[in-house]
Amino acid sequence: MDANATTPMLPEVFEAMRPWLTENFGNASSVHQHGQHARAAVERARTSAARLLNCRESEVVFTSGGTESDNIAAFGLVKPGDHIITTSIEHHAILHAAEKLAQRGFEVTFLPVSTGCRIDPDEVRRALRPNTALISIMMANNETGVIQPLEEIGQIAREADIWFHTDAVQATGKIPIDVQAIGCDLLSISGHKFHAPQGTGVLYVRRGTQIEPLFFGGTHERQRRAGTENVPGIVGLGKAAEIAADSVTNGALDRVAALRDKLEKGVLERVEGSGVNGAGQPRAPNTTNLYFNNLEGEALVIALDMKGLAVSGGSACASGAAEPSHVLTAMGLRPERARASLRFSLTKLNTQQDVDDALDIIPAAVSRLRELAPVNAGTLG
């Protein structure tokens, strides 16, 4: 139950990749038949990714994942003297990129969020300056699952004629994504968050948006991302994109939401002093962030792991950090409550039995830890 960290590759995805890992090995830039066969596979995957995002095939740029896509968006449009707007709850791929830009002399505004982990569009409007060049706000938060009001923010960006990027890594395959409705100029996704292989991703770049590449070499991806295409990975991402697009209409997302709600309700009923961070807000259907008063979340992660249940104390990219979650503290939670919080995130592969098993394991583990270490951690929000 740690799908927001990564997801297993689906069998259909692996089977689509298999020929490109063995007998088919052409370079997609080569003019001979092997190369053109590979090129056709890449373009089929591009069509699938474009369908998932509701964009043109030419607006799909294949990358190595969400971090690279976010970094291209952060560094590829701004110039010295520009002002950038982002939020205090972004994934570190944006947060640290923005901090690096600030160190280089760019002006950066990190907007606050509500106690429900949501940005107020009016805060975005108030933060605008004459030199604002880029707004970057995530679609669904990776720790709480809370979905941000992107269409309203997109409208603000259009009215001000400012580039608008969104990190949609944790939204892909979980909620519908329509770049036309959002009105964004750039959007990042990562394959391994929706059952594609690790090391694959996409940056949507609206037609007419001239980005400066991070890598220099060949003319791949219409000169926006140099480097020989990872054909097997791209094929796998394309297949996963087809499955993700279908899940919006075939009821798969509703089933995941029902499992998440059952897990959440069961924990709150069975564990005293527990609650939901981000409750009452629109959330990705697979994610819940729960707090457990009077214990340390890290100890609970280990206790649950020993019973075969994998969850997270927050972003996997920040695991091992001594500080409490930057997302939860930005929401106004005191460090004790933030440290007592865990993220549960499901996939389409989870079952009713998985939830039943988790509801047997979690209360017992919490009770045992509280008996062993009766501290006052996490009792205040």
Image (cartoon, grey):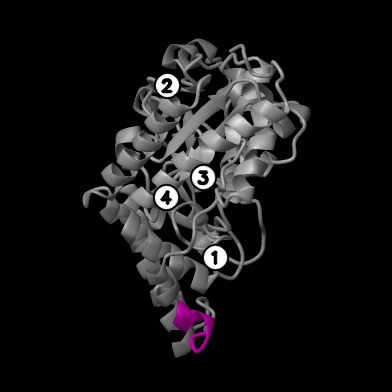
Q: Which residue is at 67% across, 43% downward?
A: 302
345 sits left or right of 178 in the view:
right
State the image quarter where residue 371 is shown: top right
Looking at the image, is mark 4 or mark 1 earlier in the sequence? 1
Kindly identify which residue carries mark 4: 354
Q: Residues within 10 Å of mark 4 (few under 14, many from 20)?
A: some
Instruction: Give the mark toward the camera: 3 or 1.
Output: 3
State the image quarter where residue 46 is shown: bottom left
Type of amino acid at the residue the image marks with label 4: Asp
Kindly identify which residue carries mark 2: 279
Q: CA distance from mark 2 to mark 4?
A: 23 Å
Start and end of the magenta stretch?
18-25
Instruction: Give the mark toward the camera: 2 or 3.
Output: 2
Q: Could you tell me residue 7's position as x and y percent?
A: 49, 55
Kindly identify which residue carries mark 3: 4
Looking at the image, is mark 3 or mark 1 earlier in the sequence? 3
Instruction: Give the mark toward the camera: 2 or 4.
Output: 4
Kindly identify which residue carries mark 1: 220
Type of amino acid at the residue the image marks with label 3: Asn
Looking at the image, is mark 2 or mark 4 earlier in the sequence? 2
Q: Is residue 306 above or below residue 35?
A: above
Looking at the image, is mark 1 or mark 2 earlier in the sequence? 1
Q: Secondary structure at mark 1?
A: helix
